[in-house]
Each structure stands twice: as structure tokens, then as C-alpha cells.
């Protein structure tokens, strides 16, 4: 089995203005995938009313998904990748871009070295 990293995290204290900008969020996800040398296949997002969104980046190596909670200045992040780079750096990048703080809930390596 290939090496797969699964990371679940929270981005807290985020800029609500940036969280509500779906073009910005999609851009952050694409940049996070690129910095991890992952292959972007498709980006899908859905904006909820009155606030919040879900965005998903489909990768050849798996996915990155986010669910925003503007009322709590928080974003739930799930990443799974068989890439070689550490997903924690993408979580840190996302926190910086959203002016927030990252918290790792789970970081697990499954499979090969």
C-alpha cells in the first residue's frame, strides 16, 4: 500500500471576510495543493445562505476539503494525500492566508514509508 497521510485540523480565529469569499477559499486550496506538489483535478464549492461554505479539491493523489463556520471564525479541514510532502505545511499555509491559527486534530500516516 502506498504511503497516505490523513490530516484533520481546525483553522480558528480566521478572517470572516476571507472565509466568506469562495473565490479566495478556492484559490487557497489550489495553492495548498500546488505547494505540496499534488495534481489538481477539480475544485468544487457550495456557498450556504446566510453564511458558510464547503469547498473540495479533488487531487490525483486524493483530496482537500474545507467546511467554514463564519459564526465561530473556524474552518474544518480534512486532507488525504499519497504525496511526499507533509500536509501540516499546507494547514499552516492555509492558516496564514486566512489570518488564523491552525490546530491539528489528527495526523496519521497509513501504509508504506
Image (spheres, grey):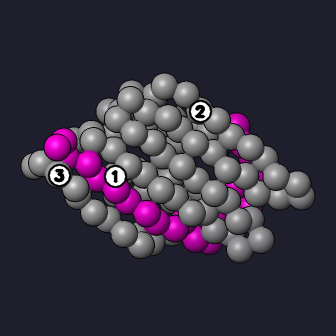
> Looking at the image, is mark 1 or mark 3 earlier in the sequence?
1
Q: Which numbered disc flags the more N-terminal residue, 1 or 2? A: 2
Against 27, residue 69 (above or below) is: below
Do tag 1 and tag 3 residues touch (Cβ < 8 Å)?
Answer: no
User: Residue drawn 35% across and 35% down?
Assistant: 61
Query: Residue 93's x, y, as percent?
Result: 44, 52
Identify residue for label 1. Answer: 87
Q: Position of residue 5 (x, y in %)?
A: 29, 53
The magenta region covers: 1-25
The image position of residue 39, as x and y in percent, is: 39, 27
Q: Regarding mark 1 in the picture, which secondary structure is present there?
A: helix
Pick whichever of labels 3 and 2 is earlier in the sequence.
2
Q: Marks 3 and 2, Cα distance to the nearest angstrom?
A: 27 Å
Nearer to me, 90 or 62: 62
Numbered mark located on residue 43 in the image: 2
Q: Is residue 26 magenta?
A: no
Magenta-span inclusion, residue 13: yes
The residue that disc 3 covers is 111
Q: Is residue 55 visible?
A: yes
Amino acid at each position: 500500500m502506498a504511503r497516505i497521510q490523513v490530516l484533520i485540523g481546525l483553522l480558528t480565529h480566521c478572517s470572516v471576510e476571507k472565509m466568506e469569499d469562495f473565490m479566495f477559499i478556492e484559490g487557497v486550496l489550489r495553492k495548498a495543493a500546488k505547494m505540496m506538489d499534488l495534481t489538481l483535478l477539480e475544485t468544487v464549492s457550495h456557498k450556504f445562505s446566510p453564511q458558510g461554505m464547503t469547498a473540495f479539491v479533488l487531487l490525483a493523489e486524493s483530496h482537500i476539503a474545507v467546511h467554514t463556520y463564519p459564526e465561530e471564525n473556524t474552518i474544518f479541514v480534512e486532507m488525504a494525500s499519497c504525496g511526499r510532502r507533509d500536509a501540516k505545511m499546507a494547514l499552516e499555509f492555509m492558516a496564514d492566508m486566512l489570518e488564523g491559527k491552525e490546530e491539528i486534530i489528527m495526523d496519521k500516516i497509513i501504509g508504506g514509508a
